[in-house]
Structure formats: structure tokens, C-alpha cells
Image: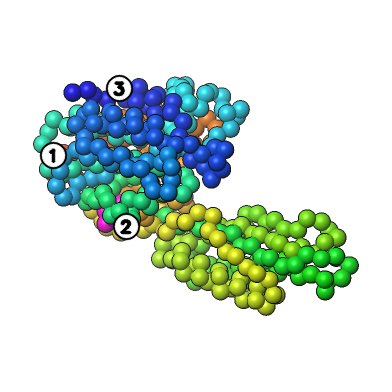
């Protein structure tokens, strides 16, 4: 039976495979190369593997690799895509894993291809033991854009396990809650005309001014109503990102579009928020006699919130010595939680290095990550809770 390469070789090979996902067709790439590579390694180690094409997204695939059988078990989950990059701003080749200054540089080293290599390396020495429940290594598509991979899994109701650890970069601190995210576009269509006589047209830019005032009023109401002191930014946020309208000072603006994002707190619902936006902006459009269209720039992420007293969160706190935290960035957590799994976000590296030139993973994070993941596998798959001790103490490294 073939086996996976060494840990460092796995990281090198994964980093070397381009798998950018982007809303821009110029950048967007298939993730099939990464999925195929992982499938080869995992099937060689005895995992039952299933490569899933994602309907409506050509060239995009998920991988579900399972070792053992039965109910319960553990999912170790990550995404196979990376964000676009500015090669001219990198000091090294983004697709060549480069070790320098006790760091591993490369696109996806932190966010988050290296996590797959670490998950495989953590599991490898345990595979000769009898598994009481399955270990599932889950690799998804397009987390950085549409999240079509995680959405497809949630819609299919598969896979399921007792617990799921998503290896996003959190500095190996457990995260049990994050905000949701919406990106919306409102377009107003009025009537252009000569600027010398306002009666010749219907100014979409002026109507958008009123829509923006309504949205700002909605933001103030939401922030007055919703507050969570567990977050650094304790209220929901709404950001006006860009606006486009008109073409010349002496023409009445006939078309105007506003793009904005909204970050709801746990307990808020994206669909309800969208309905409020439609009602407020629609009232302005009707009053001003302009046509309105609201579209989502991507389907959005619901807020994620686990219980701090859940088995997985408490285990993660005990192993790491850190209290579970909240973060502002979004993950695939809501989709895995939708599948009924006790879910936590925790992985090596820092979000401060993600999406940046010279993205890196500190070498010092690797031993602790391997110990942590083996202890999660031991607890959920081997049924031996006695082997689970403090990760920091067992690895001899600090976090």
C-alpha cells in the first residue's frame, strides 16, 4: 500500500498547485489538482475517498476522505482554494514553499493548504489502531468566494460526525463564534436628461442619496438593538464600499448603483436583514419614481455560534489552555454546524498573515498542531479520553 509523502513534501506539493478562487474570471481557477493530490495520498493510507463535482460550478470539487466507519467521529476540515496574489509584492515565489527565518512562506501556507498536510501527518501514526468512530478529512472548494463547496455539503446533508474542527488560522486558539457576512448591490434606474431642466429626467443619484440615508438609519437601529461584548467590534457593521452613477456633470444621472457589506452578529438572520433593506430602499424608490433592483454579490454567510459549554469547545480549551474566542472573519462553520456537528474553528498561523504578500506559517506552530490534532482524533475516533492531556505541555512548545 502506498503512503503519503513526508510532511514537508506534502506542504511543498500543495503550495505548488495553483487553486485561486475569485469572483473575477481572469483569476478564478479549478481546485481539481489539489483535490486529486489529496485523494491520492489519503486513498493510499487506507481512507475511503469520494471526489464530489459541485453542480453549477465547473472545475470545482469537494473531497470527503473517511477512515473507519460508524456513527460519530471527527471531521478535520479545510478549504483548498487561495485568494489572488500580487507576485511583484512577494519576496519569494508564491508557489514555492520557502523556509526562511523559522517560517514557511507560500500562498496557502497559512490560509490554509498546509492544514491538510498537518491533518494527514497527525493521523498517520494512529492508523494502525482500531478506530471506534470515523475520521473524516474534508477538503472544500471556493471558501474564499462563493463557499459553493460547503453549501453543497450542507444541502446534501453529508458528511456527518460528532465534531468538526475547521483549521483556519487562529493561532491555535479555539474560536466558537463569528459574525456573518452579506455583500449587496442596490441599483436605481431613473431617467437621464439635460441638466438645464430637472423636469427632463429623474435623478437616480439623488434617489440613491435618500436610500443611503435610510440604510444609515437602519444601521443605527441595528447597532442600538444588537450588541455582543464578546466581540472586539460589539455591534453589527454596515460599510458602503463603492458607488457608481452617471457619466457627465451636464446630464441628469439615469443610473446609480451602491455596493455595501453588512456583518451581522450571532442571533441575527441574513434573510430578515435583506427583507428590511428591500422594504426601506423600496419605499424610497417608489416615492422617487425610480426602478430598484437588489442583488446579493454572493449568497452570504450566516453568523456562527457554538455553545461555550459544548464538549468540543471545552476540550479545545483544555488542550490549548486558552478560552474560546470570537473573531470578525467568516468561515465555513455555519455550514458544518448545519450538518449537526459540534464545531470549532482552530488552526495554526495567524489571520494577520492571510491574504497578504509573503504569507507564512511559523515553524514553531507545527509540533503543537500535530499534538493537538492527534489528541482530537484520539478522543473522538479511538475512544481513549485518557490519552488526552494538555497539548502545550505535551508538545513542549508555547503558543
Per the image, the residue denoted by label 2 is: 338
Write down the region rendered in magenta. 336-343
Q: Quadrant of residue 137?
A: top left
- In the rendering, at what x and y percent does residue 308 appear? 31, 57
Q: Earlier in the sequence, mark 1 or mark 2?
A: 1
- In the rendering, at what x and y percent does residue 344 appear? 32, 49
- Within 10 angstroms of label 2, few (less than 14), some, or many (20 or more) residues? some
> Could you tell me how far apart the alpha carbons at marks 3 and 1 are, in whole angstroms?
23 Å
Q: Quadrant of residue 112?
A: top left
Residue 337 in the magenta stretch? The answer is yes
- In the rendering, at what x and y percent does residue 331 appear? 41, 49
Relative vertical location of residue 377 with respect to residue 230 in this rendering, above or below: above
- In the rendering, at what x and y percent does residue 281 appear? 61, 71
Question: Can you say which quadrant of the picture contains the C terminus?
Answer: top left
Mark 3: secondary structure: loop
Per the image, the residue denoted by label 3 is: 6
Residue 355 in the magenta stretch? The answer is no
- Within 10 angstroms of label 3, few (less than 14), some, or many (20 or more) residues? few
> Could you tell me how far apart the alpha carbons at marks 1 and 2 are, in whole angstroms?
25 Å
Name the side, left or right, on which 383 lies relative to 28: left
**Which label is found at residue 328?**
none
Name the side, left or right, on which 216 lies relative to 246: left
Mark 1: secondary structure: loop
Per the image, the residue denoted by label 1 is: 131
Foreground label between 3 and 2? 2
Amino acid at each position: 500500500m502506498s503512503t503519503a509523502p513526508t510532511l514537508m513534501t506534502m506542504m511543498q506539493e500543495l503550495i505548488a498547485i495553483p487553486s485561486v478562487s475569485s469572483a473575477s474570471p481572469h483569476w478564478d481557477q479549478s481546485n481539481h489538482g489539489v483535490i486529486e493530490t489529496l485523494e491520492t495520498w489519503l486513498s493510499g493510507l487506507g481512507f475511503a475517498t469520494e471526489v464530489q463535482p459541485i453542480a453549477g460550478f465547473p472545475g470545482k470539487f469537494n473531497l470527503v476522505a473517511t477512515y473507519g466507519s460508524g456513527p460519530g467521529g471527527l471531521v478535520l476540515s479545510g478549504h483548498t482554494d487561495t485568494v489572488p496574489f500580487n507576485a511583484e509584492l512577494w519576496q519569494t515565489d508564491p508557489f514555492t514553499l520557502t523556509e526562511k527565518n523559522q517560517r514557511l512562506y507560500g500562498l496557502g501556507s497559512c490560509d490554509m493548504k498546509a492544514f491538510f498536510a498537518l491533518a494527514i501527518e497527525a493521523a498517520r501514526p494512529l492508523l494502525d489502531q482500531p478506530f471506534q468512530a470515523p475520521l473524516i478529512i474534508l477538503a472544500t472548494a471556493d471558501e474564499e468566494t462563493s463557499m459553493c463547496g460547503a453549501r453543497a455539503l450542507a444541502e446534501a446533508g453529508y458528511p456527518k460526525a460528532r465534531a468538526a474542527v475547521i483549521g483556519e488560522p487562529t493561532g491555535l486558539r479555539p474560536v466558537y463564534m463569528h459574525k456573518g457576512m452579506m455583500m449587496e448591490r442596490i441599483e436605481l434606474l431613473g431617467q437621464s436628461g439635460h441638466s438645464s431642466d430637472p423636469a427632463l429626467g429623474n435623478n437616480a443619484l439623488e434617489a440613491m442619496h435618500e436610500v443611503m440615508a435610510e440604510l444609515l438609519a437602519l444601521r443605527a437601529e441595528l447597532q442600538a438593538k444588537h450588541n455582543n461584548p464578546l466581540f472586539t467590534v460589539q455591534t453589527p457593521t454596515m460599510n458602503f464600499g463603492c458607488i457608481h452613477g452617471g457619466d457627465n456633470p451636464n446630464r441628469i444621472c439615469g443610473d446609480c448603483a451602491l455596493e455595501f457589506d453588512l456583518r451581522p452578529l450571532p442571533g441575527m438572520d441574513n434573510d430578515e436583514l435583506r427583507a428590511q433593506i428591500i422594504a426601506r430602499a423600496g419605499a424610497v424608490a417608489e416615492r422617487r419614481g425610480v426602478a430598484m433592483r437588489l442583488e446579493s454579490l454572493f449568497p452570504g454567510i450566516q453568523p456562527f455560534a457554538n455553545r461555550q459549554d459544548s464538549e468540543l469547545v471545552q476540550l479545545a480549551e483544555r488542550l490549548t489552555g486558552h478560552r474560546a474566542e470570537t473573531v470578525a472573519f467568516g468561515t465555513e462553520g455555519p455550514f458544518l454546524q448545519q450538518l449537526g456537528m459540534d464545531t470549532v474553528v482552530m488552526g495554526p498561523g495567524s489571520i494577520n498573515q492571510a491574504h497578504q504578500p509573503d504569507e507564512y506559517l511559523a515553524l514553531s506552530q507545527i509540533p503543537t498542531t500535530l499534538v493537538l490534532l492527534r489528541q482530537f482524533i484520539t478522543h473522538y475516533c479511538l475512544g481513549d479520553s485518557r490519552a488526552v492531556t494538555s497539548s502545550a505541555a505535551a508538545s513542549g512548545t508555547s503558543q
